[in-house]
Image (tube, rainbow, N blue to C red):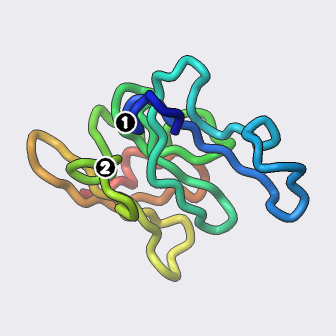
Amino acid sequence: WNHPAMPWDSTELRVTDIYSAKSNESRDHKLIAGREDGDTSVIQPAYQGGRLYYISNRSGYYNIYRAGFEGSILPMEADFGGPTPDRQLGQQGFSFMPGKAGRLVAQYNKNGRSVLLTANVSDGRAPASDIKE
């Protein structure tokens, strides 16, 4: 996050190989999500099965994305991540079920209430028929 922008206004998600990194400068890191225009928030990154997942508001809603996959894996007009998704360190609005490859569990807000869902995202975007609330 780059001051003076607030984390809910503008953040970037970058990765680097810490063993071969040339420096800690951001130009030596690969930009995964976030924009140079400073109008995208990226929160709650997590690795699962060697893949990097994160929540971003690039669509106007805090949806879940997977690095290297175009678009949200659960596109909805709803915010994932909890009641205040970007304001508490360590908060995670999604996780994966142990022993169930690609089975995501997530919480989002809908019509003023919290909803828990599961979906299979192992192949990228979850089919609507597979999302269980």
Instruction: Kindly report the distance in space between the C-alpha atoms of the residues bearing marks 1 and 2.
Output: 8 Å
Q: Secondary structure at mark 2?
A: loop
Q: Earlier in the sequence, mark 1 or mark 2?
A: 1
* 102 over 83 or under it: above or below: below
Task: Give the labeled residue for mark 1.
Answer: 8
On-image quarter of the C terminus:
bottom left
Q: Residue furthest top?
A: 37
> Residue 61's spot in the image, x, y percent?
34, 32
Amino acid type at mark 1: Trp
Task: Give the labeled residue for mark 2.
Answer: 87
| Residue in the image at 36% along x and 39% along y | 62
Query: Is 20 on the left or on the right of 81, as rendered?
Result: right
Badge 1: residue crowd in 10 Å (few <14, some 14–19, many ≥20) = some
Query: Is 69 on the left or on the right of 114, as rendered?
Result: right
Query: Is 97 on the left or on the right of 29, as rendered?
Result: left
| Residue in the image at 20% along x and 55% along y | 115
> Residue 35's spot in the image, x, y percent?
58, 25
Residue 132 is at least partly visible in this image: no
| Residue in the image at 45% along x and 54% along y | 44
Residue contact between numbered discs 1 and 2, judged by CB atoms under 8 Å: yes
Residue 1 is at least partly visible in this image: yes
* 18 over 74 or under it: above or below: below
Q: Nearer the viewer, residue 6 or 53?
A: 6
Q: Secondary structure at mark 1?
A: loop
Amino acid type at mark 2: Arg
Q: Residue furthest front?
A: 4
